Image (spheres, rainbow, N blue to C red):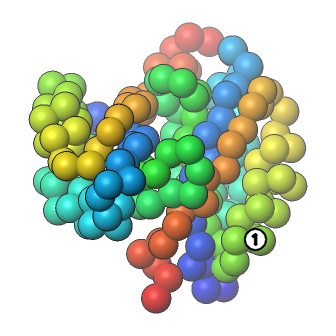
């Protein structure tokens, strides 16, 4: 299994003008996107992205994901390594 | 158990209790993955179950009972890939 340094969850809002399921299928094809699911609620979809450099996460979200037609907004939550909190103690 | 339904739980956690809370969350059998995150929420957990009722049960009876959680939300996956 490949090891990645950075992981992030991104919550997405999708325009009602497009077919949401189609957008999710498109997201699943993007390299770096590990999971993409449609959600019930105020967010329409969630994706999980992985990369080795923080700027790759940035490029993935800003250039590849946000440029897909129908994606209205993205909310990125970068995963934190537990070890960082362990050091705090 | 045929785990076909998936949900994502977003948590806000009391400052200083994050590590303790995330460890407790990971002990719950229906939790497949739990991560601390930066942003609007403090943690994201993926839960699975046979039915949406099971997801709700896990959310209300197990996840929400962990002390240190200040707010929680469950988003059910609309058409999980696991469901055929």
Q: Horizontal placement of A67 versus B2: left or right?
A: left
Does residue B66 show up? yes
- Chain letter, disc 1 residue: B
Query: Which residue is drawn at the image coordinates 72% and 56% (left, top)?
Result: B28
Query: Which residue is drawn at the image coordinates 52% and 67% (left, top)?
Result: B78
Find residue A11 and report its horizontal and vertical position in percent: 43, 41
Does residue A1 show up? no
Find residue B63 and report its horizontal and vertical position in percent: 76, 48
Q: Give the residue at the far top of this rendering.
A: A88
Residue in front for this viewpoint, B10 or A38: A38
The answer to whether residue B40 is above or below residue A34 is above
Query: Which residue is drawn at the image coordinates 40% and 43% (left, top)?
Result: A13
Find residue A89 and report its horizontal and vertical position in percent: 62, 12
Find residue B1 and report its horizontal and vertical position in percent: 66, 85
Say which residue label 1 marks.
Answer: B54
- Quarter holding the N terminus of chain A? bottom left
The answer to whether residue A60 is above or below residue B79 is above
Query: Which residue is drawn at the image coordinates 44% and 60% (left, top)?
Result: A38
């Amino acid at each position: 299994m490949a090891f990645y340094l950075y992981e992030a969850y991104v919550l997405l809002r999708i325009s009602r003008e497009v077919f949401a399921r189609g957008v999710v299928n498109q997201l699943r094809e993007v390299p770096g996107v590990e999971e993409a699911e449609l959600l019930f609620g105020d967010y329409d979809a969630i994706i999980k992205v992985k990369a080795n450099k923080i700027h790759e996460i940035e490029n993935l979200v800003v250039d590849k994901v946000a440029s897909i037609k129908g994606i209205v907004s993205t909310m990125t939550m970068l995963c934190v390594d537990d070890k960082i909190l362990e050091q705090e103690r | 158990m045929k785990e076909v339904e998936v949900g994502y739980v977003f948590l806000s956690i009391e400052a200083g209790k994050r590590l303790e809370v995330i460890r407790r969350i990971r002990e719950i059998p229906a939790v497949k993955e739990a991560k601390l995150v930066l942003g609007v929420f403090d943690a994201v957990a993926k839960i699975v179950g046979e039915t949406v009722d099971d997801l709700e049960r896990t959310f209300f009876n197990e996840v929400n009972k962990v002390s240190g959680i200040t707010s929680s939300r469950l988003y059910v996956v609309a058409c999980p890939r696991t469901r055929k």
